[in-house]
Image: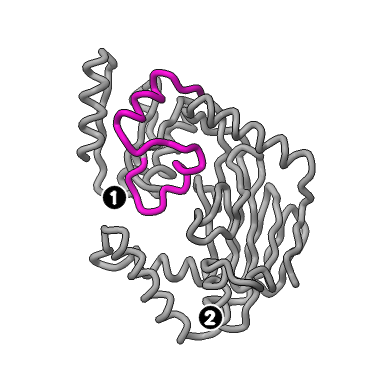
Amino acid sequence: MSTALKLRDALAKRRRRTSLEVFEDLESLHRWAQQDNDPFAALVCVGGDGTQSTTALAAVRRSVPFLPVSSGFGNLFARAFKHPATVEGALDLLAHGQVIHSDVGLRNGELFLCQQSYGLIAEVQEAVEAAAAAPRSRWQRWLAYYRAALGHIRQTRPARLRVVVDGRVVSADAALVIVANVKTYGPWLPLAPDASPVDGLFDVFVLKGATHRQVFRKLLQWHLRLPGAASDTLLCRGARVSVLGLRSGREQLEVLRGRLPVVVSPETAAALEQGRHRQEAGVPLVLDRVA
Protein backbone atom coordinates (compact mmCIF):
# COMPACT_ATOMS: atom_id res chain seq x y z
CA MET A 1 0.00 0.00 0.00
CA SER A 2 2.85 2.37 0.83
CA THR A 3 4.41 1.82 -2.60
CA ALA A 4 1.10 2.34 -4.38
CA LEU A 5 0.38 5.58 -2.51
CA LYS A 6 3.86 6.97 -3.18
CA LEU A 7 3.56 6.10 -6.86
CA ARG A 8 0.14 7.73 -7.14
CA ASP A 9 1.38 10.92 -5.47
CA ALA A 10 4.50 11.03 -7.64
CA LEU A 11 2.42 10.69 -10.82
CA ALA A 12 0.04 13.38 -9.62
CA LYS A 13 2.99 15.76 -9.16
CA ARG A 14 3.88 15.04 -12.79
CA ARG A 15 0.33 16.05 -13.73
CA ARG A 16 -0.64 12.50 -14.65
CA ARG A 17 -4.25 11.68 -13.93
CA THR A 18 -4.39 8.54 -11.76
CA SER A 19 -6.92 6.35 -10.00
CA LEU A 20 -5.96 3.98 -7.17
CA GLU A 21 -7.99 0.80 -6.67
CA VAL A 22 -7.45 -1.45 -3.64
CA PHE A 23 -8.71 -5.03 -3.30
CA GLU A 24 -8.87 -7.29 -0.27
CA ASP A 25 -8.77 -10.54 -2.23
CA LEU A 26 -8.24 -11.95 -5.72
CA GLU A 27 -11.94 -12.63 -6.21
CA SER A 28 -12.90 -8.96 -5.95
CA LEU A 29 -9.92 -8.02 -8.12
CA HIS A 30 -11.02 -10.52 -10.74
CA ARG A 31 -14.51 -9.03 -10.84
CA TRP A 32 -13.02 -5.57 -11.39
CA ALA A 33 -10.68 -6.83 -14.14
CA GLN A 34 -13.64 -8.27 -16.06
CA GLN A 35 -15.42 -4.92 -16.20
CA ASP A 36 -15.06 -2.37 -18.97
CA ASN A 37 -16.47 0.65 -17.15
CA ASP A 38 -13.38 2.80 -16.63
CA PRO A 39 -11.08 3.62 -19.57
CA PHE A 40 -7.40 4.19 -18.87
CA ALA A 41 -4.18 4.57 -20.86
CA ALA A 42 -1.91 2.33 -18.75
CA LEU A 43 -2.25 -0.07 -15.82
CA VAL A 44 0.24 -0.39 -12.95
CA CYS A 45 -0.08 -3.31 -10.53
CA VAL A 46 1.66 -3.38 -7.14
CA GLY A 47 1.63 -6.96 -5.88
CA GLY A 48 2.90 -10.49 -6.32
CA ASP A 49 2.45 -12.99 -9.13
CA GLY A 50 -1.12 -13.93 -8.22
CA THR A 51 -2.20 -10.30 -8.07
CA GLN A 52 -0.43 -9.51 -11.33
CA SER A 53 -1.97 -12.46 -13.18
CA THR A 54 -5.45 -11.38 -12.12
CA THR A 55 -4.85 -7.71 -12.88
CA ALA A 56 -3.35 -8.47 -16.30
CA LEU A 57 -6.78 -9.59 -17.48
CA ALA A 58 -7.86 -5.92 -17.47
CA ALA A 59 -4.85 -4.92 -19.58
CA VAL A 60 -5.46 -7.75 -22.05
CA ARG A 61 -9.14 -6.85 -22.42
CA ARG A 62 -8.31 -3.20 -23.12
CA SER A 63 -4.94 -3.71 -24.89
CA VAL A 64 -3.29 -1.09 -22.67
CA PRO A 65 0.34 -1.14 -21.40
CA PHE A 66 0.84 -3.08 -18.18
CA LEU A 67 3.56 -2.41 -15.60
CA PRO A 68 4.04 -4.78 -12.64
CA VAL A 69 5.73 -3.42 -9.51
CA SER A 70 7.06 -6.32 -7.45
CA SER A 71 5.61 -6.72 -3.97
CA GLY A 72 5.23 -10.44 -3.48
CA PHE A 73 7.07 -13.66 -2.62
CA GLY A 74 8.27 -15.05 -5.93
CA ASN A 75 7.78 -12.14 -8.36
CA LEU A 76 8.58 -14.48 -11.27
CA PHE A 77 6.78 -12.43 -13.92
CA ALA A 78 8.44 -9.17 -12.89
CA ARG A 79 11.84 -10.90 -12.83
CA ALA A 80 11.34 -12.10 -16.40
CA PHE A 81 11.24 -8.47 -17.52
CA LYS A 82 13.64 -7.08 -14.87
CA HIS A 83 10.86 -4.91 -13.54
CA PRO A 84 11.63 -2.68 -10.55
CA ALA A 85 10.23 -2.98 -7.06
CA THR A 86 10.63 0.74 -6.33
CA VAL A 87 8.59 3.84 -7.07
CA GLU A 88 11.59 5.49 -8.73
CA GLY A 89 12.10 2.52 -11.05
CA ALA A 90 8.43 2.44 -12.03
CA LEU A 91 8.42 6.16 -12.76
CA ASP A 92 11.49 5.79 -14.96
CA LEU A 93 9.87 3.00 -16.99
CA LEU A 94 6.65 4.98 -17.42
CA ALA A 95 8.68 7.92 -18.71
CA HIS A 96 11.33 6.18 -20.81
CA GLY A 97 10.30 2.54 -21.27
CA GLN A 98 8.91 0.89 -24.35
CA VAL A 99 6.05 -1.53 -24.89
CA ILE A 100 6.57 -5.13 -25.96
CA HIS A 101 3.96 -7.85 -26.18
CA SER A 102 4.14 -10.76 -23.75
CA ASP A 103 2.54 -14.16 -24.08
CA VAL A 104 -0.09 -15.13 -21.56
CA GLY A 105 -1.37 -18.57 -20.67
CA LEU A 106 -4.90 -19.85 -20.42
CA ARG A 107 -5.76 -22.63 -17.99
CA ASN A 108 -9.27 -23.92 -18.62
CA GLY A 109 -10.11 -20.44 -19.88
CA GLU A 110 -8.50 -18.53 -16.97
CA LEU A 111 -5.50 -16.28 -17.65
CA PHE A 112 -2.12 -16.80 -15.96
CA LEU A 113 1.27 -15.15 -16.44
CA CYS A 114 3.86 -17.43 -14.81
CA GLN A 115 3.20 -21.15 -14.53
CA GLN A 116 0.81 -23.90 -13.56
CA SER A 117 2.10 -26.85 -11.56
CA TYR A 118 0.64 -30.28 -10.86
CA GLY A 119 1.82 -32.76 -8.26
CA LEU A 120 3.88 -32.24 -5.11
CA ILE A 121 4.76 -28.56 -5.63
CA ALA A 122 1.13 -27.62 -6.30
CA GLU A 123 -0.05 -29.56 -3.23
CA VAL A 124 2.55 -27.92 -0.98
CA GLN A 125 1.78 -24.44 -2.30
CA GLU A 126 -1.94 -24.96 -1.82
CA ALA A 127 -1.41 -26.14 1.76
CA VAL A 128 0.73 -23.11 2.66
CA GLU A 129 -1.35 -20.47 0.89
CA ALA A 130 -4.64 -21.86 2.22
CA ALA A 131 -3.50 -21.62 5.85
CA ALA A 132 -5.54 -19.27 7.99
CA ALA A 133 -2.43 -17.26 8.85
CA ALA A 134 -0.09 -17.65 5.89
CA PRO A 135 3.39 -16.29 6.76
CA ARG A 136 4.29 -12.92 5.28
CA SER A 137 8.06 -12.69 5.73
CA ARG A 138 10.31 -14.44 3.21
CA TRP A 139 12.16 -16.72 5.63
CA GLN A 140 8.91 -17.78 7.34
CA ARG A 141 7.37 -18.55 3.95
CA TRP A 142 10.36 -20.71 2.95
CA LEU A 143 10.14 -22.56 6.28
CA ALA A 144 6.42 -23.14 5.80
CA TYR A 145 7.03 -24.62 2.34
CA TYR A 146 9.69 -27.00 3.63
CA ARG A 147 7.46 -28.12 6.50
CA ALA A 148 4.54 -28.74 4.16
CA ALA A 149 6.78 -30.70 1.77
CA LEU A 150 8.06 -32.91 4.59
CA GLY A 151 4.48 -33.56 5.65
CA HIS A 152 3.46 -34.58 2.13
CA ILE A 153 6.23 -37.14 1.62
CA ARG A 154 4.59 -39.35 4.25
CA GLN A 155 1.31 -39.41 2.38
CA THR A 156 0.04 -41.61 -0.41
CA ARG A 157 1.76 -42.18 -3.73
CA PRO A 158 1.71 -39.34 -6.25
CA ALA A 159 -0.80 -39.31 -9.07
CA ARG A 160 0.15 -40.77 -12.45
CA LEU A 161 -0.36 -37.88 -14.84
CA ARG A 162 -0.68 -38.13 -18.59
CA VAL A 163 0.86 -35.14 -20.38
CA VAL A 164 0.10 -34.22 -23.99
CA VAL A 165 2.02 -31.39 -25.71
CA ASP A 166 0.75 -30.18 -29.09
CA GLY A 167 -1.02 -33.50 -29.64
CA ARG A 168 1.98 -35.62 -28.68
CA VAL A 169 1.98 -37.79 -25.54
CA VAL A 170 5.23 -36.96 -23.73
CA SER A 171 4.49 -38.87 -20.52
CA ALA A 172 1.90 -41.36 -19.34
CA ASP A 173 3.05 -41.60 -15.70
CA ALA A 174 4.36 -38.21 -14.58
CA ALA A 175 4.41 -37.44 -10.87
CA LEU A 176 5.15 -33.72 -11.27
CA VAL A 177 4.30 -31.39 -14.17
CA ILE A 178 5.09 -27.70 -14.55
CA VAL A 179 3.80 -25.66 -17.49
CA ALA A 180 5.86 -22.45 -17.52
CA ASN A 181 5.57 -19.15 -19.36
CA VAL A 182 8.58 -17.66 -17.50
CA LYS A 183 11.65 -19.07 -15.74
CA THR A 184 10.43 -21.37 -12.99
CA TYR A 185 11.03 -21.15 -10.07
CA GLY A 186 13.83 -18.65 -10.52
CA PRO A 187 17.35 -19.43 -9.29
CA TRP A 188 15.99 -21.27 -6.24
CA LEU A 189 14.63 -24.19 -8.28
CA PRO A 190 15.49 -23.76 -11.99
CA LEU A 191 13.20 -26.39 -13.51
CA ALA A 192 12.46 -24.33 -16.64
CA PRO A 193 15.50 -22.03 -16.84
CA ASP A 194 15.00 -21.02 -20.47
CA ALA A 195 11.27 -20.33 -20.47
CA SER A 196 10.50 -17.06 -22.24
CA PRO A 197 7.32 -14.95 -22.17
CA VAL A 198 7.86 -13.78 -25.75
CA ASP A 199 8.45 -17.02 -27.73
CA GLY A 200 4.84 -18.16 -28.12
CA LEU A 201 5.51 -21.45 -26.31
CA PHE A 202 5.28 -23.01 -22.87
CA ASP A 203 8.25 -24.82 -21.37
CA VAL A 204 6.90 -28.08 -19.91
CA PHE A 205 8.86 -29.85 -17.16
CA VAL A 206 7.95 -33.46 -16.36
CA LEU A 207 9.31 -35.56 -13.47
CA LYS A 208 8.66 -39.22 -12.77
CA GLY A 209 8.60 -40.72 -9.29
CA ALA A 210 6.92 -43.69 -7.64
CA THR A 211 6.59 -41.96 -4.25
CA HIS A 212 6.44 -38.44 -2.89
CA ARG A 213 9.74 -39.15 -1.17
CA GLN A 214 11.40 -39.79 -4.54
CA VAL A 215 9.92 -36.61 -6.00
CA PHE A 216 11.08 -34.56 -3.01
CA ARG A 217 14.57 -36.04 -3.21
CA LYS A 218 14.79 -35.22 -6.92
CA LEU A 219 13.66 -31.62 -6.34
CA LEU A 220 16.24 -31.28 -3.57
CA GLN A 221 18.90 -32.43 -6.05
CA TRP A 222 17.78 -29.71 -8.45
CA HIS A 223 17.84 -27.12 -5.68
CA LEU A 224 21.37 -28.10 -4.60
CA ARG A 225 22.61 -28.58 -8.20
CA LEU A 226 23.69 -32.16 -7.42
CA PRO A 227 24.78 -34.67 -10.09
CA GLY A 228 22.00 -36.85 -11.44
CA ALA A 229 19.26 -34.28 -10.91
CA ALA A 230 18.21 -34.51 -14.57
CA SER A 231 17.49 -38.25 -14.51
CA ASP A 232 13.83 -39.26 -14.89
CA THR A 233 12.95 -35.77 -16.14
CA LEU A 234 11.81 -34.37 -19.44
CA LEU A 235 11.68 -30.85 -20.82
CA CYS A 236 9.70 -29.89 -23.90
CA ARG A 237 8.04 -26.87 -25.49
CA GLY A 238 4.63 -26.41 -26.99
CA ALA A 239 1.70 -24.07 -27.42
CA ARG A 240 -1.02 -26.43 -26.14
CA VAL A 241 -0.77 -28.75 -23.17
CA SER A 242 -3.21 -31.23 -21.61
CA VAL A 243 -2.71 -32.80 -18.19
CA LEU A 244 -4.93 -35.77 -17.33
CA GLY A 245 -5.22 -37.99 -14.26
CA LEU A 246 -5.95 -35.22 -11.79
CA ARG A 247 -8.66 -35.44 -9.16
CA SER A 248 -10.07 -32.22 -10.61
CA GLY A 249 -10.20 -33.75 -14.10
CA ARG A 250 -8.48 -32.64 -17.28
CA GLU A 251 -6.46 -29.43 -17.42
CA GLN A 252 -6.24 -27.66 -20.78
CA LEU A 253 -3.58 -25.00 -21.21
CA GLU A 254 -2.72 -22.86 -24.22
CA VAL A 255 -0.55 -19.87 -25.07
CA LEU A 256 -2.05 -16.62 -26.26
CA ARG A 257 0.91 -15.19 -28.12
CA GLY A 258 1.75 -11.53 -27.61
CA ARG A 259 -1.59 -10.62 -26.02
CA LEU A 260 -0.31 -8.54 -23.09
CA PRO A 261 1.37 -5.15 -23.74
CA VAL A 262 4.12 -4.77 -21.12
CA VAL A 263 6.25 -1.73 -20.33
CA VAL A 264 9.97 -2.63 -20.17
CA SER A 265 13.30 -0.90 -20.44
CA PRO A 266 14.91 -0.67 -23.90
CA GLU A 267 17.71 -2.94 -22.67
CA THR A 268 15.27 -5.63 -21.54
CA ALA A 269 13.36 -5.43 -24.82
CA ALA A 270 16.57 -5.97 -26.80
CA ALA A 271 17.69 -8.88 -24.61
CA LEU A 272 14.32 -10.65 -24.88
CA GLU A 273 14.29 -10.22 -28.64
CA GLN A 274 17.78 -11.72 -28.95
CA GLY A 275 16.78 -14.66 -26.76
CA ARG A 276 13.68 -15.28 -28.83
CA HIS A 277 15.68 -15.42 -32.04
CA ARG A 278 18.15 -17.88 -30.53
CA GLN A 279 15.34 -20.20 -29.45
CA GLU A 280 13.56 -20.05 -32.79
CA ALA A 281 16.82 -20.87 -34.59
CA GLY A 282 17.62 -24.17 -32.96
CA VAL A 283 15.37 -25.55 -30.21
CA PRO A 284 13.51 -28.79 -30.96
CA LEU A 285 10.06 -29.56 -29.65
CA VAL A 286 11.22 -32.13 -27.11
CA LEU A 287 14.47 -32.08 -25.16
CA ASP A 288 14.82 -35.47 -23.50
CA ARG A 289 16.64 -35.36 -20.16
CA VAL A 290 15.99 -38.99 -19.20
CA ALA A 291 19.39 -40.51 -18.28
- Amino acid on which disc 2 is placed: His
Residue at far top of view: 15
In this view of the protein, can residue 111 be seen by the observer?
Answer: no
Q: What range is drawn magenta here?
A: 70-98
61 vs 221, nearest the viewer: 221
Q: List x then y, in percent, for residue 139.
A: 31, 63
Q: Is label 2 in a helix, a strand or a loop?
A: helix
Quarter-wise, where is residue 146 in the image? bottom left
Q: How far apart are the alpha carbons under marks 2 and 1?
A: 32 Å
Residue 88 is situated, as x and y percent measured from the top left of the image, at 31, 28
Kind of residue indicated by mark 1: Asp
Crowd tier of the residue under label 2, counting other residues whose Cα lies within 10 Å: few below 14, some 14–19, many 20 or above: many
Left or right, 168 with respect to 52, comes to right
Q: Residue at x 53, y 53 (%)?
A: 115
Q: Where 64 sits versus 253, above or below?
A: above
Q: Give the residue at mark 1.
A: 25
Q: Which residue is mark 2?
A: 212
236 displayed left or right of 262: right
- Which quarter of the figure is the C terminus placed in? bottom right
**Could you tell me if the residues under marks 2 and 1 are in contact, i.e. CB atoms within 8 Å?**
no
Callout 1 environment at 10 Å: few (<14), some (14 to 19), or many (20+)? few
